[in-house]
Amino acid sequence: MAKPRIQFICQACGNVTSRWAGKCEACGEWNTLVEEGTAGGIGSGPASMRSTRKGRAVVLTSLSGEIEDAPRIASGIGELDRATGGGFVRGSALLVGGDPGIGKSTLLTQAAAALASRGHRIVYVSGEEAVAQIRLRAQRLGVANSTVELAAETNVEDILATIADGKRPDLVILDSIQTLWTDAADSAPGTVTQVRSAAQTMIRYAKSTGAAIVLVGHVTKEGQIAGPRVVEHMVDAVLYFEGEGGHHYRILRTVKNRFGPTDEIGVFEMSDKGLREVSNPSELFLGERHATAPGAAVFAGMEGTRPVLVEIQALVAPTSLGTPRRAVVGWDGARLAMVLAVLEAHCGLRFGTHDVYLNVAGGYRISEPAADLAVAAALVSSLTGLALPADCVYFGEISLSGAIRPVAHAQQRLKEAEKLGFGQAVLPRGSEEPGSGIGAASFQPATLTDLVVRIAGSLRRDADD
């Protein structure tokens, strides 16, 4: 009998190698190679997978035809339905990731209870908690009387046998994918082989039966979902549940969705009774704003189809260090360096002897370049010590030449600002027609120098008064 070969599999990317090394050659991660046998799963040769069963012919059909059930299952939780694109798609697999204790299980428990109250069969399978612990959470959330079916199991074959009994479930929640294991793989639970095999088995069940599957994934310290990245390619949608420990809000962000937009967010507020929807997140991020302090500018941003107003705070302070500090929270540090370089090269401002600190209020994270203009206004305001107008919003992209480039959805940004009581705006030229109201009172600088001159001019007017 031939001796089984031993191979080493990277737990971060799934790369297979014949010998152990401290660093994975594929992804560059350290100490991620784990020894696994080749009896099955990743690394198994053709001989081990050989079978005498002949292929089974499948039925071919056309694109046209009737759909038996509704294509989506709406939970009734508006922010969750917004992030998923309108609800859970039947026959789809969805991966939810987030830091430990961020509220993933709380959100899914509330969603399961909301769907069960609408007459759907919901199965909640936990591999990390006992049934009694889930019941305690349900009592705290006030949903203990819902008809959600619970189980505490980690074997995939036992889970499939359990949910196959009775009516087909509309939604199956598995918390979490790292705890599941299948008899088809010989590795320990949590390894690449087991995670991939278990996810593939559950996705195959979802596609064949029409039941929606929700997989919960752990997040590493780098902010990525733990396990092989191939799982993110296998599922239909990936959602990240984000939030800071010192803040009471949570953001459900869509990073992949085959059936909807990939840049939507759902905003929730954590309380002792669970997660509460925040229908107007702009009021949440501007709730503790100090309007008369210098270095603060309100940015009118977009998250998918939703406009969000958030305060950007900058602090420019003299330093005695040879190399001044550049600290950024909630924005891209490289983009801050670019804005500082443009201000120095084209506007004559000097930040080389100052520390620069930039923060997005409320722990919110901005990814779109339209925040360049608001960041530049906050930096100039802090450097000059002049507070910006309290009723003004900023948005626009800055180029390396100092020009301010237009951004999309200008009308939606202005309408959101006007709804919250803002009376003026600073936006690029060439944007959508401002129209009346706040758009009519807008200032449209062609270059960043025009904005600096406007701020410095208001400073001179205040000195004259």
Image (cartoon, rainbow, N blue to C red):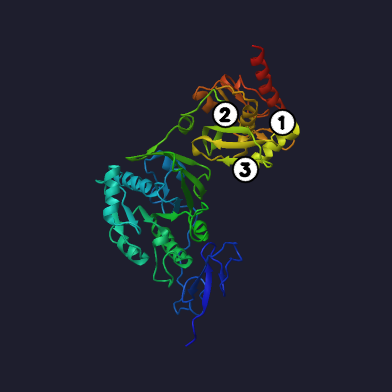
Q: In front: mark 2 or mark 1? A: 1
Q: Amino acid at mark 1?
A: Leu
Residue 194 lies, in percent from the top left, at: 44, 66
Residue beneath label 3, please? 333
| First reached walking from the N terminus: tag 2 or tag 3 | 2
| First reached walking from the N terminus: tag 3 or tag 1 | 3
Q: Is residue 93 left or right of residue 132?
A: right
Residue beneath label 1, please? 349
Residue lying at the far bottom in this picture: please name it: 1
Which element type, helix, strand or loop, lies under badge 3?
A: helix
Q: Is residue 447 visible?
A: no
Locate residue 22: give its quadrant: bottom right
Q: In front: mark 3 or mark 1? A: 1
Residue lying at the far top in this picture: please name it: 465
Residue beneath label 2, please? 296
Which element type, helix, strand or loop, lies under badge 2?
A: strand
Q: Amino acid at mark 2?
A: Ala
Give how far apart the Cα atoms at labels 2 and 1 are: 18 Å
Q: Amino acid at mark 3?
A: Gly
Q: Is residue 386 left or right of residue 101?
A: right
Q: Is residue 40 above or below residue 252?
A: below
Which element type, helix, strand or loop, lies under badge 1?
A: loop
Tell me the quarter of the image containing the C terminus.
top right
Q: Is residue 44 left or right of residue 100?
A: right
